[in-house]
Amino acid sequence: MYEFNTTLDHPFEQALALVREALLTQQLGIVSEVDVQAVLKQKLQKEIPPYRILGACSPLLAERVLAAEPNAGALLPCNLVVRDVGNNRTQVSFMDPVVVLGLSTSSEVKAVAAEAKEKLSKVLAQLETD
């Protein structure tokens, strides 16, 4: 599978704030954010529930990947989706960096992927206790 996820018993905005906090505890910053709900509304006049794609990154891990394989930047950052699933519940889905960075043949890139997955797994565990 390309992702792992959890569903939080929190409304979207509260869950989004919890995700941001949990990422920071693992030294993961948000380097990109796409408000899919707003894009679809603006471009297609389509209404969907709140849906964000966050690009999470650890500069130290990213630097190691790029040093080992410069073109592996195409596989960065670690993306995650935060989406409203109704009834004041929010699903958080994490891209599995082991799967995605496993496309590389570099052992260093694969080692970084394992470290990134460990960090994201800790974020998931923290979210499940909030």
Image (cartoon, rainbow, N blue to C red):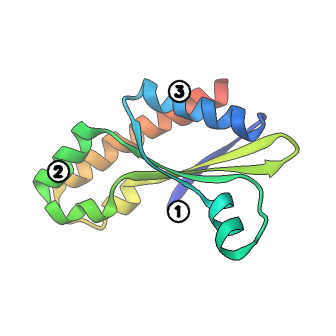
Reading the image, the residue beneath label 1 is 1
What quarter of the picture does the C terminus occupy?
top right
Q: Nearer the viewer, residue 81 or 117?
A: 81
Instruction: Where is residue 109? Give x, y as percent.
Output: 22, 53
Q: Quadrant of residue 99?
A: bottom left
The answer to whether the residue labelled 3 contacts the one labelled 1, judged by CB atoms less than 8 Å apart, is no
Instruction: Where is residue 42? Give x, y as percent.
Output: 67, 67
Please tell me which residue is depicted at 25% across the width and 42% down the height of the picture: 61
The span from disc 3 to disc 1 (Cα, nearest Å) is: 26 Å
Amino acid, disc 3 = Glu
Question: How dense is the environment of label 1, judged by Cα within 10 Å: few (below 14), some, or many (20 and up)?
Answer: few
Reading the image, the residue beneath label 2 is 108
Residue closest to the far bottom: 44
Residue 104 as seen in the image, left or right of residue 8? left
The span from disc 3 to disc 2 (Cα, nearest Å) is: 28 Å
Instruction: Where is residue 16? Give x, y as percent.
Output: 63, 37
Q: Is 65 rendered above or below residue 69? A: above
Q: Residue 21 has which mark? A: 3
Q: Is 29 rendered above or below residue 93? A: above
The answer to whether the residue labelled 1 contacts the one labelled 2, judged by CB atoms less than 8 Å apart, is no
Of mark 3 and mark 2, the one earlier in the sequence is 3
Amino acid, disc 2 = Glu
The span from disc 1 to disc 2 (Cα, nearest Å) is: 22 Å
Amino acid, disc 1 = Met
Q: Is 3 rendered above or below residue 11? A: below
Residue 118 as seen in the image, left or right of residue 6? left
Instruction: Where is residue 36? Give x, y as percent.
Output: 62, 60
Of mark 1 and mark 2, the one earlier in the sequence is 1
